[in-house]
Image: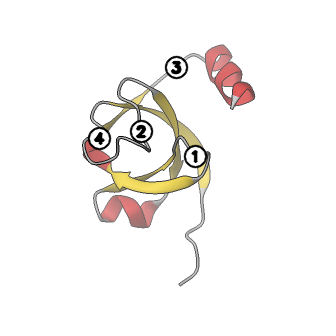
Amino acid sequence: MPKPKLVASRFVICIDNKGYNASLEKRKIYVSLSDATALKHGQIRVIDESGEDYLFPKSLFLRITIPASLRKAILKAA
């Protein structure tokens, strides 16, 4: 099965890491990649602590909006 097309990154904050303690930290901001197929299944694609993107339950995160200057700084630091 081909990997889904990933576009435009967004930011999310982890509000629960139950079952994913090694992959996610609560209250940490993560980059989320758009994945329409994952959303249909209640999941989102997130770049986790390993630096790779994986699917996680959408319920573990809240989408956040940040100013452009902060967005640039976060992406540069990643």
Alpha carbon separation for disc pair 3 and 4: 19 Å
**In terms of depth relative to the viewer, which is nearer, 24 or 3?**
24
Mark 2 element type: loop
The crowd level at tag 1 (other Cα within 10 Å; few <14, some 14-19, many 20+) is few
**In terms of depth relative to the viewer, which is nearer, 55 or 9?**
55
For marks 3 and 2 on the same chain, the one whose residue lies earlier in the sequence: 2
Mark 1 element type: loop
Amino acid type assigned to the residue bearing label 3 in the image? Ile
Please report the residue visible at 40 percent of the width from the left and 31 percent of the height from the top.
25
Alpha carbon separation for disc pair 4 and 1: 18 Å
Alpha carbon separation for disc pair 2 and 4: 9 Å
The residue at which mark 3 appears reads as 66
Vertical relation: 57 (above or below) 18? below
Mark 4 element type: helix
Which mark lies nearer to you, 1 or 3? 1
Tell me, yes or no, whether the two marked residues, 3 and 4, touch with CB atoms within 8 Å: no
The residue at which mark 4 appears reads as 60
Tell me, yes or no, whether the two marked residues, 2 and 4, touch with CB atoms within 8 Å: yes
For marks 4 and 1 on the same chain, the one whose residue lies earlier in the sequence: 1
Mark 3 element type: loop
Vertical relation: 65 (above or below) 17? above
Q: State the residue lying farthest toward the bottom.
A: 1
Residue 5's x, y, as percent?
Answer: 60, 66
**In terms of depth relative to the viewer, which is nearer, 67 or 48?**
48
Tell me, yes or no, whether the two marked residues, 4 and 1, touch with CB atoms within 8 Å: no
Amino acid type assigned to the residue bearing label 2 in the image? Leu
The residue at which mark 2 appears reads as 24
Vertical relation: 75 (above or below) 52? above
The residue at which mark 1 appears reads as 50
Please report the residue visible at 28 percent of the width from the left and 57 percent of the height from the top.
42
